[in-house]
Amino acid sequence: MAEMSLNELTALLRECAGEEDGVDLDGDVMDVPFVELGYDSLAVLQTTGRIEQDYDVRISDDAAAEAHTPRMLLAFINESLSQATAA
């Protein structure tokens, strides 16, 4: 996998932490804070743990904590994927 897409990320968020009523993850959520999407830091950490397991990459807890939006989290994920592919 060269790069994770927003659709793949939102699917994993749904699987790992569910989806709050009234939140449309299929919309333009790239820059919407996770808190507004109904996800706390634990939900993001659970999701990154799943990504690490499924894609054999490492995403630091600090990076996951600093990622306040899907765009920021995808940047960390895709950087890790890119480094894993290059190794």
Image: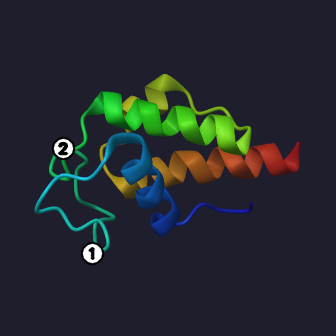
Look at the numbered disc 1 and give the secondary structure of its residue: loop
Residue type at numbered disc 1: Gly
User: Which residue has dot 1 on it?
Assistant: 27
Count neighbours of disc 2 (C-alpha within 10 A) and say few if under 14, some if 14 to 19, many if 20 or more: few
Q: Residue 79 — which label?
A: none
Cα–Cα span, label 2 and label 1: 16 Å
Q: Residue furthest right?
A: 87
Q: Nearer the viewer, residue 53 or 73?
A: 53
Q: Is residue 82 above or below residue 87?
A: below
Count neighbours of disc 1 (C-alpha within 10 A) and say few if under 14, some if 14 to 19, many if 20 or more: few
Residue 16 picture quarter: top left
Expressed as whole percent of the image width and height from the top left, the position of residue 59 reads 58, 33
Residue type at numbered disc 2: Val
Residue at point 55% right, 27% down?
60
Q: Nearer the viewer, residue 27 or 76?
A: 27
Residue at point 61% right, 53% down?
78
Q: Which corner quadrant holds the C terminus?
A: top right
Q: Residue furthest bottom?
A: 27
Expressed as whole percent of the image width and height from the top left, the position of residue 7 reads 47, 68
Q: Residue furthest top?
A: 61
Residue 44 picture quarter: top left
Residue at point 46% right, 39% down?
47
User: Which residue has dot 2 on it?
Assistant: 35
Expressed as whole percent of the image width and height from the top left, the position of residue 33 reads 22, 51
Q: Which corner quadrant holds the N terminus?
A: bottom right
